[in-house]
Image (cartoon, rainbow, N blue to C red):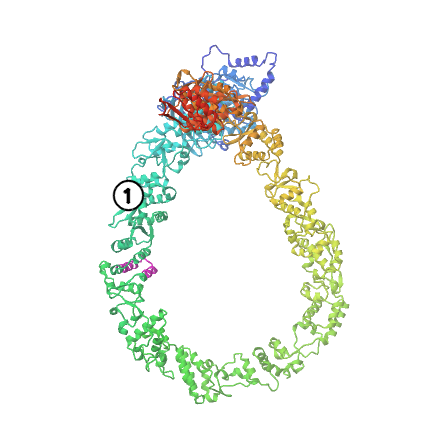
Amino acid sequence: MTYSPSSPSTAPAAEMPLPPREHVERIRRERFFIGRGERNPLAEDMHQAVNYLSHELYSKDVHFLMELIQNAIFMASGLAKHWYSGLCISVTPHSELLTLSSSREHRPLLRLHRRSASTGGPLRSSSNFPAIGREKGDPEAENAEDNEYPSGVSPTLEFVITTKDITHSGATATLLVFNNEKGFAPENIESICRIGKSTKKGQRDSAYIGEKGIGFKSVFLVSSTPHIFSNGYQIKFSEDACTKCGIGYIVPEWVEEHRIIRDLTKIYGCLKNLPTTTIILPLKNDKIEAMKKELSSTHPEILLFLSKIRKISVREINDGLNATSLSQISISSEADALTRKDIGAESYTLHLSAEEDKTGNHHCSYYIWKQHFPVKPECRVQKRSEIDQWVVMLAFPHGQRLSQGLGSPGVYAFLPTEMVTNFPFIIQADFLLSSSRESIQLDSPWNRGILDHVPSAFLNAFMALVKSTVNAPVFALPPIFKFVPLNQSSVPLIDSVRMSIRNKLIDAEIMPCETCSPLKVFCKPTEVGRLNAAFWGIVNKAVELGVDVPNISSHGTHILSSYFDNTEYDDVLGFLGVGYVNYEWYGKCIQGSDLAVVLPEDIYLDLLAFVAQNWKVEFASTNMHYIPLIKCAGADGEVTYMSVYEAKTADGKLCMLSDEYVPLVIKWNKSYFSSISRTVFLPMSTHKALEQFPHRSTVVEWLEKYVCMKNLTVHEYAITVVKALHEKNQVLAFTHFIYQLHKEKYMPEWNINHLCSMVPIVDNCGSVIATRSAVLLPARMSKWAALLGKSPWRDQSYVELADDYMSASKFSEGHAYEDHFLSFVKKYMQATDVPSLVPPDAGFPAASSPLTMKNALLLLEWIEDLRSRDVTLPPKFLNCIICGTWLKTSVGYCAPSESFLLNEEWGHLFQAEAAFVDVPMIDQKFYLGKVASYKNVLETLGVKFEFSDAMSYIGKNFMSMDAGALTADSMLSLLQFIRFLQQEHISPDHLISSIRNGRWVKTCHGYMSPAESILFSSEWTIPSEISCLPFVDIDFYGNGISSFKSELEILGVLVRFKQNYQVIVDNFKLPIGSVTSGTAIMLLKCIRYADSCRKLVKGLKKRPWLKTNAGFRAPRETFLLDSEWKCLVKFADVVPLLDLSFYGDEILSYREELMKIRVVASLEQASNAITSHLKQLLSTCSITKEIRLALISCYKELSEKKTFPANILKFMHTEKWLHTSHGFRTPDKCALFDCSWEPVIPVASLPFIDDSDSIHGTGKKIYSYKKELKALGVAVDLNHGADILLSSLAIDETHEMSIPNGLNPCLSLNSTLVALLKCMQLSAHPRKFAEEIRKMQIKTTLGYRYADGCILYDSTWSSYFHMEDGPFIDVSFYGPDILSYRTELKMIGIVLDVGSGCSLMALNLKSFSRTDTISRIYRYFSAFKWEPKNEGENWIWIPKGRSSGQWVRPGDCVLHDRSGLFSVRFNVLDNYYEKDLFLFFSTAFHVRHSPRVLDHCILWRSWECTSFELRPASCSSFWGFIGSHWNTMTANLLSGSVTRVPVLVNDKIVLREVEDVFVPDDLLLKHLFDQFSSNPMFVWYPTGLSFVSRAKMDIIYQSLGVRSISKAVIKAGSFLPNLSSCQVVETTDAIVTPGFLRIILAFLANPALEIASEKRHQMVSCLPSTKVLEMIEPITVSYKVELLSSGRTVSVKVRRMFRWEREDRKLYIQKSVGLLGRTAKMEMATCFAEEMSQGLLYERVDLISSLTELLKIGFLVDFEGDEVEFLPRSKNLQLFPEDVDFLLDAFPARGLEVLGQISSVYFIFQFTHSFLSYNATILCIFRMTHAVDYAACLMLLKFQQAPTIILGSHNCFI
């Protein structure tokens, strides 16, 4: 069965073609010799060639997808006006592509649609519309784009990935490509079976670009057996060589598999016809993921410049024929094409939309500009020989470009390349691409020619965008400028396009300007100016508020549109050179637009802030000084305006109030004070607006600093006014002004006080008083007059206020405020009255007699006020009041010092007459109860108020009675009064304190004080048995006194015992007979609690009053049993012990008191029996744990008192009564275990006391008797067991010691060494200890080491190392105590001396990786002059990071690399180490100081081999070193190493062959070649190196073989245009002048040149007759140099202003237009001098430069005047007579001019002498001092017709 496509090709054929299968067989037979019985001799070569091409052509494995797409897309040449496209691409992310879903149906996943804009139906055949970019010679996309499609078919390209193995080749995935083109024709099959035989070659003008003939072969990158089903062909290819012909890749093989068709139909859809062409690619396993990734990354803009394909889809189908949905992207265009016939351009808009299932729709519109340009002849290439026009298309995206995260290509060749331009637009043209199609060929003249036209296309497109829509608002224009390419491209050629675009834009009128009309105005970027953003804000605010702001562009400068003038477009504006207006403009605008007047207050302040912020830098030197800008409040209330200058120079200074009461101040200033304040204020509205203004501080600071405005507070203003007050009315007004400020709370208190202290006073006589001591209220309004009658202070300069102050109507606007104002005057003007006045120091007469109630209260008020103000009362005045009897009391008028003032608490006591004495109380009823409010004043005057004073008064009277006269009733009355006071809750303390010390209480011992008396009760029964006490006489007072116990206690009488033992002791008497237990306890209590009991103790010591088990005994004969002695007391039977059963246990609490009376106890008598008993128990092994512990316990207790029996102690020392781990031992052979032994347990076997609970053990309680055991000789800790330890040591070098249960191994290990050292220190045999310790390994910071490999770290080592820097003993492990055993450590071999550790540190050096540690070791080596034995080892550490690096040889290091060039070649130590180590590295390791010249030569050679681009800094450093070390040896080394030298390319340094670059010794030639040569040709020079001059660099470069441009260049001669355009200059001698010829002759006459006069004249003889021709067309000259390495020649042409044809005696001059500037004139002078010098000195080229300089200067001075005469002389040149003759002959008509130029000291006068007989013209020449002067005179004779007299220097006449 053959494959039958649904749409077979219907193209007619010239002849009937063979059937597909026969056609394939013929190809196999004729081309590949299959079936012919022979083999193609080139078969193997063909196979390898195709293999190489298919795998190496593209840099990416899946680039063949581009080939397939190009096979399906046709790019048309033109854009018809009614052409629309709708293209759809769906691109699925990789993760989605791999997702399979069984629930989804077949559906295309990538769609492309194109519909007609007018009908909505399909477009007509593309042949009816010119395609995009399709003009004659316009290139097309390849392959699929080159396909043809049947009419009425929507061109579709579909990619399907399926897991089904359709070809049954074992592939795990297959890619299917469906295309509904017309199908493969026989010639296509022929082409695909060949190499380089594309059917599209030579058809560029027919829309085909496929020309390599190898595109399809790239499918072998991903598939081994691609299949093609098209137009009846069903063939496959294999990458393996055919067994029949030995060739692979291009040998077709017919496919017979019928299942393939069924599978394809099933996958594509049973209800749909298969497309015409299907390509089946069984994918290689390693290419499946790459294939999916490539499909997923199809760029959305891929169809941007393509036309034919209308649908592209990608989908994936698994074995279950379920598809995975992918995203969608669609493209559509609108009918807005515009044709520009004048420039051959067209434009339209293309809309691209991307649809994704997850992220939704994304849209972007592209403005497409297409323009045609003719192909330049010099840019033609063979591949595009048939193309006559370039078509450049630019796409400008409106919005975010659709990139799907895949990047944004900047250059398209119909399909995207991978070139990134950094431009905001896309460039499309028929570029020549590299083989990989990833970039364009940058060195191609074809591509360069296209790029040269991109700037023009951009400018035209940009202008069309900017100006195309007349009615577009201005704000729509600035976004267009985002298409300006601002970012620099990394490709120099592309970046030059960017700069060319910039230059064109600068010369175009593209900038929208601000106007006052709807008409849009555009200007060039250099013609517009920007405004400060703050000023724009002012203008815009004003416009928004409807303020009429005149056109701001009418002040001499076009202003950029405000929509454009913002920071968003700063980069664009800077790129185009748009600057800001000068600051003079702002002044013109403000004044011309009257902004200060028309702006509202808030915007007006913005204007002031703008001026203030820019004043110092910008406006200070402009006309802004004279602009009326400052608002002022006029006298009539109108607003006026002042300039800054006027404000600074006006008489009235501008002021601003900084407070909130501006209206009040302005009002009063206007009404009363304007004539004296001389101030002008800002208007009220400005004040208010300024308070809320955010930039208030800026405006105020400017006004103060530059406008000289004073920023006043109201206080400062008031001070200004008060200093000018002189008249009564002004003083009164100002006083009321201050009152108003106070009333409204506009001024703080201290300011009011300050002003009132300064203001003058108007007295009652109307006078203005400036100074005063005090101010009095008027007498008619005062209290002092009512009290005193007349003023006693007149002599003290007191001023009485005038009544005019109270006249308020004038100032208060009709409101009465006299009382408030009077209060103000009193408070702030210190107007005083009683009680505020200070009284005089004199007696007060009124106080000598009773005062009325009113006067008395006024007096008290006066005194109270004085006290409140801390005023000291005059002594005489105060004494008079204190002693005067003016105060009314209950007993009459009394002095205050004798009176009492009752209060509610105790006043009723005296009213009830409970007291014994009458008290003079103040009559408060008389004073209406008001006197109590003056309590403090009365107290000052001596009046008593307190109840205590009254009680003292009563007590004093009670004690004045005689004690014998006091009856029992008096006593009881007193007690009754005390009880009454308590019942009234009043304290009687003061009464009691006044009577308690008197001896008025009658006792059994006589009269006593209450404190010495006792009231008897039952508590006193026992004390009365052993003491004689003074009890109150009950018989005298009666039993009734017992009812007053509490009152007696208050008086101090002892009513209760209350532990008052001292009373018993003081009255002690010895008891008679036996003493009861209670009495005995009472006596012991007295001893304990009494303060002094010596007499009592002494009396009790000798008397037998203590009851024992042996009867009553004296204390010294009695023993008190202690419970702790029970273990020994059981052996005693005859000790008299205190009878505890008699006294009870209470007596045991008085042990100390018993000891004071000598109660004792002794065990010495029983000690022998106890010792014998213990020995008996030991002999029978019957000593139990309890006995041992009891014995030790008794020893502990008795040892402290030193009473332990000696015989028992001897037993304990000498007998083996302690059981140990080694058996029974005496105490001195035992050890008691504690933690101090743990460190040595692993190395010793010790006899520890058995602490078990067995019969021989002691239990754990033994450890509580450590002190006692130590006293008995037991080694209780390691400090006291050194000898026992030495005898028990068992150290094993393997350290595998068993550790007892319960011990901490870590603790044992880290403390064993210290413990052994400590014992070694304490032992009498330290050397034996040392021998044992040396067998141990010691822990160091580097691990465990034997002693001879360790160092002890201490303060001497700390100055060199940290603890972790070497094998230092780990002090943190062993503890700081180890440092105290230096002697012992040294004895075991540890290094202690800091100078002895070099060798040990060197052995450990390479175990470190931290730079700081290694640096310290190096410093230590340096300090002790250490040197390695082998320098060749890796002794130097090079860090890489903090704790990594490598050890290197010293020979691989240098100390310094100042230039940083050898970071790879050498290890530069100053990068890693401090400079203090450099001497050590140099001396110990012999490290070089810095790289040598040879190292630099090697470095340069490596640069040549590895990189052609260098950093300027690196290159400068290299040549700086070479220059500073330049000598013969350096030159020899360098010349053998350097083959390339640096040149500068786009600010980057690259290396070029020495033969291809030049030394720029001629800057003009350098400028020419730099300007016209595409590649840099001149050596680069370092900058900033003072030690390498350019001259020296020239020497260095030339020594390397670099040629000088002046020597290498070849001048090809000048090119003369059409001579018919020449115009002969009428006055030839205007160019060839005598001055010109004179300079040349003087130069040639230099004796040093040795040019004879005849030769000189011959050389210049052609000049006078030279014809000068003026040329309209330019004169050019060509220079060329040969690049020796490549053999290429670089030529440049330059315009010349002069061309001298010496042989033809013609001088051609370029005609100039207008006046020449200085630069042009200098250029003309240089060109003229060079042309003439080269023509004259063609035989003496070495002299050309010198003559050129002379002629250049002469040309600039027009070869005339004294300058020409001076010029040769300045060069020590002169004319000789023969030269003068030549000049005169050459210019016969200008002889005088010739002579006039010979010497500037000639003075020629022509006169007529009267004494001659005829009229004679005499020429006198003075001061001829040289032979040439005489020769000149002789020449003159030829031109004179009259006699001539010549006066020589010697006064001789000729």
In this view, the residue in front, 138 or 1108, is 138
Instruction: Kindly give the residue lying farthest to the top in the view shown.
Output: 15
Q: Is residue 922 left or right of residue 1490?
A: left
- Badge 1 local density, few (<14 within 10 Å), some, or many (20+)? some
Against 563, residue 630 (above or below) is below
Residue 1409 shows up from this direction: no
Residue 737 magenta-highlighted: yes
In this view, the residue in front, 1055 or 1643, is 1643
Q: How far across and how far down the image is residue 23, in percent?
A: 52, 13
Q: How far across and how far down the image is residue 1243, in percent?
A: 72, 54
Which quadrant holds residue 833? bottom left
Residue 1742 shows up from this direction: yes
Instruction: Tell me the chief SS of the magenta region.
Output: helix
Q: In this view, does 1113 lie to the left or right of 1027?
A: right
According to the picture, the residue beneath numbered tag 1 turns out to be: 597
Instruction: Kindly give the residue lying farthest to the right in the view shown.
Output: 1179
Which quadrant holds residue 605? top left
Which residue type does callout 1 highlight? Val
- Give, as a single range, the part of the protein colored magenta: 733-755
Q: How far across and how far down the image is residue 505, in percent?
A: 40, 29
In this view, the residue in front, 1676 or 107, is 1676
- Image quadrant where one finds the C terminus: top left
Residue 150 magenta-highlighted: no
In this view, the residue in front, 265 or 197, is 197
Q: In this view, does 1523 lie to the left or right of 761?
A: right
